[in-house]
Amino acid sequence: MEKARPLWANPLQFVFACISYAVGLGNVWRFPYLCQMYGGGSFLVPYIIMLIVEGMPLLYLELAVGQRMRQGSIGAFRTISPYLSGVGVASVVVSFFLAMYYNVINAWAFWYLFHSFQDPLPWSVCPLNGNRTGYDEECEKASSTQYFWYRKTLNISPSIQENGSVQWEPALCLLLAWLVVYLCILRGTESTGKMEQLANPKAWINAATQIFFSLGLGFGSLIAFASYNEPSSNCQKHAIIVSLINSSTSIFASIVTFSIYGFKATFNYENCLRKVSLLLTNTFDLEDGFLTASNLEQVKGYLASAYPSKYSEVFPHIKNCSLESELDTAVQGTGLAFIVYTEAIKNMEVSQLWSVLYFFMLLMLGIGSMLGNTAAILTPLTDSKIISSHLPKEAISGLVCLISCAIGMVFTTEAGNYWFDIFNDYAATLSLLLIVLVETIAVCYVYGLRRFESDLKAMTGRALSWYWKVMWAGVSPLLIVGLFVFYLSDYILTGTLKYQAWEASQGQLVTKDYPAYALAAIGLLVASSTMCIPLVALGIFVLRRLKTGDAAPVA
């Protein structure tokens, strides 16, 4: 008899768990960046099209697989074919990589949250130098927010070759982040809760990629969540709801982000004007208030022609103040979350309140996604009779969290942020595309689309519409192949991979080549998950051949 499987208390709880997993930091710091890079509102055209032809169909497919097979990713695809067990293994490996580095973001959010109760905010002003005769040189060359991020939070080294020691304060925050995740896991399923850019192919590629990764396809988390559903649950409706809420959240986050961009750009522009006006007023004995934004350029031209020698002396110190250039600055990732946003927050009224609310929001998004990531790892492990017969779920969960936390300490070293970027850029990109491609082929052409359609109708009482069948059998797989080829060719054409290193003497990021061992680590990250699929299939084939040989009758 099949072992009784825990169930969600009600369908709404399942939907909230999926939303909590899908709506993550990418909605806040990746989607607004893509909008700004590819024409603002016009980026919504390829984004919505990709949502219809890629996002919703693949999300529905994963939910349907989990609900039908009632197992984690490994067991679900082993049921389809033993040779496809590697698909689930690859999903677990990718989710493990993600869990190792993703929770570091929550650790940073805890760090900033704790410092948000200070007045003034510690990233709002530069600290004094050792002689207390002026401000710290690195901070003056950069900015107070960049200094707090790179020096106080990361204490970053000049390059990836200089590992440095573990920073105890971020390390303690990482321990706290993993403790929170573990405590949430123990509660189980009851608590988880511009138009010309359209001709740019990269806009369409990035729209498809954003949909793909934002929904968390290929990690096995959605399959794990759906495996705890009642077989009769309407997973089609759930897929549509989660997709639409996820995309709506991205659009809403963009509106907020662009408001912050506008506030920050206007503030920096007006501050630049004040500094230039003060410099020219003091140098040329101009009347106070004479210089304004409307006549500044005209007066600068007059002063340059009337007093050429004197103007040439101060010219290197005159900044070119441009509101347009400030607005065109596009940032994503940690640069947006911990530098641009904090730059805006420090200039707001009651900045401590806004800072606490903002970093609390980041924590909620991050922890929600982490619970989904860990579910993708734990569900196949707890489904395994070999493992679950020797260890209770609490011990399995504790071991996974402990191992992930221990390895994650690498990201709290002085070079940790460089390794974080490696994992963030390469641990899941190609791997997930391959995993979801094989998943789609497995369901449609190995298990059989007609058979799967019949199973869904028997479970839910609803027939599968032509839209889902066309997307699963043709459009979505072809789109994934296109994305896979694009990323592969992009990596090849890029040549030697580079990274951004913090140069303290200049107070800015500089581009450097990755050393050989970092390139080897990148290759290992990609290969260790993708190779699970063929290697597991080969292993099962060899074992079956050996068993067949042993069982063959002797002549």
Image: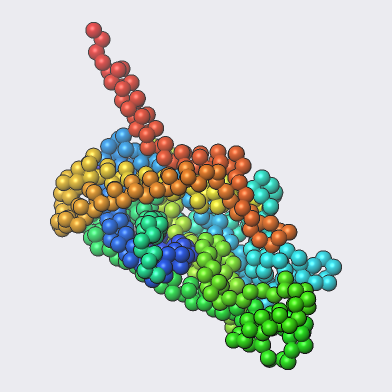
Q: Residue at x 16, y 46 (%)?
A: 450
Vertical relation: 78 (above or below) 99: above
The N terminus, quarter of image: top left
Q: Indicate the position of residue 108 as horizontal and vertical percent values.
A: 58, 61
Image side of residue 178 versus residue 236, left or right: right
Image side of residue 40 versus residue 416, left or right: left
Q: Indicate the position of residue 168 as horizontal and vertical percent values.
A: 67, 55
Q: Residue at x 22, y 41 (%)?
A: 445
The C terminus, quarter of image: top left
Q: Indicate the position of residue 200 as horizontal and vertical percent values.
A: 39, 59
Residue 72 can be seen in this image: no
Nearest to the observer: residue 307 or residue 425 = 307
Nearest to the observer: residue 20 or residue 142 = 142
Image side of residue 334 versus residue 300, left or right: left
Image quadrant where residue 251 sits: bottom left
Residue furthest to the front? 305
Question: How many badges with numbers are in the image?
Answer: 0
Q: Residue at x 77, y 74 (%)?
A: 313
Q: Indicate the position of residue 353 as horizontal and vertical percent values.
A: 57, 78
Residue 90 can be seen in this image: yes
Residue furthest to the top? 555
Image quadrant where residue 10 sits: bottom left
Nearest to the observer: residue 206 or residue 281 = 281
Q: How is the image coloured?
A: rainbow
Nearest to the observer: residue 176 or residue 479 = 479
Q: Residue at x 48, y 45 (%)?
A: 493
